Image (tube, helix red, strand yellow):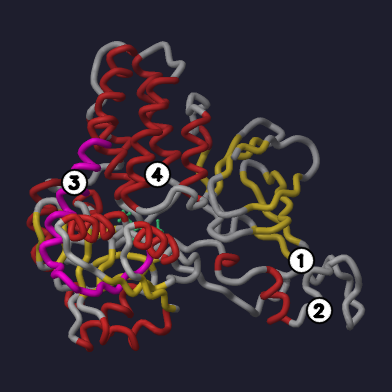
């Protein structure tokens, strides 16, 4: 999203995501709210922005400011649009995000208006940055960007364009092939008549079930709905499309149903060098309960999910998402006692406060946390299934080193 800054204030409902703002003196900044800021007024304050809500003035609190000298106007709108779709989770799932990012770089290469090789490379790097900044935890995103940018070669714009397009297409082909191969390996762990318990929605996990079904094995599934966004519903729908009997349960019922499961099967957003699995929030609790019940935990994760930075001691950033995924404005108002009719913000409430001031978010004593992912230690994981074979989590670092070496440059440094 790009918002022009003119004279006066601009009232915008900032959802999570990346925004570019131009000030009156034409300097430009980018900022990334990690939480939704309804009806914030943004004011230019020198070369920074400050955000004013009805009752507070915050200077870029919870906001990361990046000098817009780094934002190149040559990023094509389709890339901005893909970035917005990833941030808003209209495109989601680690492998799908990687695929979309490669496709976006391909589009950037096709449509770039650069007339020199240096400008082409600068615009491509800017496009990669735009995509990268959307979601911090799914490492498949920077891994995809790095793969494509490393294949960009040539001395002319035409050669750079052609090599980028070819590389992006190669990445997408290999990604699809890797998932097929992973599925066949994962299917070997599943026996005819097994019941799997799933969490969230993972195309890698689905690939294992698909391959087992193709082998003629009958399977059943217990599907956790997976709050807050209920991506378990996607899993349930896709399994029903395949004719698999599905029992949908709320997350809190998982331990009760573990006795009926032969496997816990989940995907991953990142795999750390010590074998920790970073996946949708709730995975770690499920894995601990599964270990206690003696149900093996199988993680389906292509090697694109390996997080190379963790080989050099870095930790994986856990994405925090908009609190409204957990609590609507109406629910928040009801908890905070901001009026019986939370939707009626236009009138005075029982204590005579003006409705506009008692907004749904005015109670600063109520905090909502919405981490999207958690970390499952390797001791609770039985196998990580990749396209290169299945591994005990503790040994994954060997494959990681073989695939990535020790280099963990940022994708745009490639
Ligand atoms: P595939 C999802 O994250 C889930 O955590 C899922 O396990 C993981 O991505 C991997 O998905 P989100 O994007 O790559 O829904 O296996 O936050 O499709």
Residue 317 visible somewhere in the drawing: no
Numbered label attached to residue 69:
none
Mark 4 surroundings: few (<14), some (14-19) or many (≥20) residues within 10 A: many
Q: Nearer the viewer, residue 137 or 92?
A: 92
Residue contact between numbered discs 1 and 4, judged by CB atoms under 8 Å: no
Is 329 located above or below residue 172 in the figure?
below
Depth check, mark 3 against mark 4: the one in front is 3
* Residue at point 64%, 52% (across, down): 14
Q: CA distance from mark 2 to mark 1?
A: 18 Å
Rendered image: mark on residue 132: 4
Q: Closer to the camera, 263 or 99?
A: 263
Mark 3 — residue?
A: 178
- Mark 2 vs mark 4, foreground winner is 2
Along the polypeptide, which appears first: circle 1 or circle 4? 1
**Which label lies toward us, 1 or 3?**
3
Is the residue marked by circle 1 packed among few (<14), some (14-19), or many (20+) residues within 10 Å?
few
Q: Position of residue 313 (x, y in %)?
A: 22, 61
Is disc 1 placed on a helix, strand or loop?
Answer: loop
Residue at horizontal 24%, vertical 16%?
154
Is the residue under label 4 in contact with that under label 3 (CB below 8 Å)?
A: no
* Ligand 1 quarter of the rendering: bottom left
The C terminus is located in which quarter? top left
User: CA separation, marks 2 and 4?
Assistant: 41 Å
Mark 1 or mark 3: whose residue is earlier in sequence = 1
Quarter assignment of residue 202: bottom left
Looking at mark 2, is its residue's CB closer than 8 Å to ligand 1? no
For label 1, the residue is 55
Is residue 195 rendered magenta in the image?
yes
Q: Secondary structure at mark 4?
A: helix
Give residue 383's position: percent from left, percent from top: 14, 68
Highlighted magenta segment, given as a residue range: 172-200
Q: Secondary structure at mark 2?
A: loop
């Amino acid at each position: 999203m790009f918002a022009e800054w003119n004279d006066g204030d601009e009232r915008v409902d900032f959802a999570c995501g990346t925004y570019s703002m131009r000030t009156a003196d034409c300097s430009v900044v980018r900022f990334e709210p990690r939480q939704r800021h309804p009806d914030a007024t943004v004011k230019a304050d020198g070369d920074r922005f400050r955000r004013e809500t009805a009752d507070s003035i915050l200077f870029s609190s919870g906001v990361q400011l990046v000098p817009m000298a780094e934002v190149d106007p040559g990023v094509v709108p389709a890339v901005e649009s893909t970035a917005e779709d990833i941030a808003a989770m209209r495109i989601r799932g680690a492998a799908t995000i990687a695929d979309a990012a490669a496709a976006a770089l391909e589009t950037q290469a096709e449509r770039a208006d650069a007339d020199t090789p240096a400008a082409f490379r600068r615009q491509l790097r800017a496009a990669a940055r735009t995509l990268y900044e959307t979601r911090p935890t799914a490492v498949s995103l920077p891994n995809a960007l790095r793969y494509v940018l490393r294949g960009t070669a040539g001395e002319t714009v035409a050669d750079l364009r052609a090599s980028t397009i070819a590389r992006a297409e190669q990445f997408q082909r290999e990604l699809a092939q890797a998932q097929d191969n992973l599925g066949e390996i994962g299917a070997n762990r599943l026996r005819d008549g097994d019941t799997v318990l799933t969490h969230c929605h993972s195309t890698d996990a689905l690939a294992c079930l698909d391959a087992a079904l193709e082998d003629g094995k009958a399977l059943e599934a217990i599907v956790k709905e997976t709050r807050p966004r209920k991506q378990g519903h996607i899993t349930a729908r896709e399994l029903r499309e395949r004719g698999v009997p599905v029992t949908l349960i709320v997350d809190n019922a998982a331990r009760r149903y573990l006795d009926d499961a032969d496997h816990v099967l989940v995907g991953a957003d990142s795999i750390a060098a010590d074998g920790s699995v970073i996946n949708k929030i709730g995975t770690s609790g499920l894995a601990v309960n599964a270990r206690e019940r003696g149900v093996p935990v199988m993680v389906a994760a292509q090697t694109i999910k390996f997080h190379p930075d963790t080989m050099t001691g870095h930790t994986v950033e856990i994405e925090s998402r908009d609190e409204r995924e957990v609590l609507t404005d109406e629910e928040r108002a009801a908890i905070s006692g901001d009026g019986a009719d939370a939707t009626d913000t236009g009138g005075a409430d029982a204590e005579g406060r003006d409705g506009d001031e008692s907004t749904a978010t005015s109670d600063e004593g109520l905090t909502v946390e919405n981490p999207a992912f958690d970390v499952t230690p390797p001791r609770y994981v039985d196998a990580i299934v990749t396209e290169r074979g299945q591994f005990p989590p503790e040994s994954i670092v060997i494959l990681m080193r073989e695939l990535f070496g020790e280099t963990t440059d940022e994708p745009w440094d490639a």
